[in-house]
Image (cartoon, grey):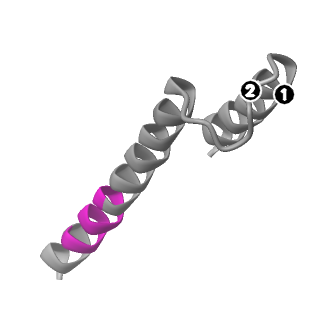
Amino acid sequence: MIIGVLSGLFYREFTKTNDFPSGEFTQLGLVLFFLALRKKVVADKAETGAAEATSLSR
């Protein structure tokens, strides 16, 4: 969560400082998308693993 917030803050400030036109595609934006996607996949996998462990212990 913290990495996502910090990377989003960096992206916003970096693009403002370097006068990127709003809405223009950047590689940094793509990296942030994949960070968010990875976080979602890892969180879902952890949730599924916890549910499976609970059902196996019964």
Nearer to the camera, 8 or 16:
16
Q: Nearer the viewer, residue 30 or 45?
A: 30
At 70% from the left and 30% from the top, the residue drawn is 11
Q: Amino acid at mark 1?
A: Lys
Is 45 placed above or below 20 here?
below
- The disc label shown at residue 20, or none: 2
From the viewer's perspective, tell me whether residue 6 is left or right of residue 27. right
**Residue numbers of the magenta segment:** 45-52
Mark 1 falls on what kind of element? helix
Question: Circle 1 sits on which residue?
Answer: 16
Label 2, secondary structure: give it.
loop
Q: Where is residue 5 drawn, in percent x and y?
A: 70, 41
Tell me: residue 47, above or below residue 26: below
Q: Is residue 21 left or right of residue 52?
A: right
Question: Which quadrant of the view contains residue 38?
Answer: top left
Most prominent secondary structure in the magenta stretch?
helix
Q: Which mark is residue 47?
A: none
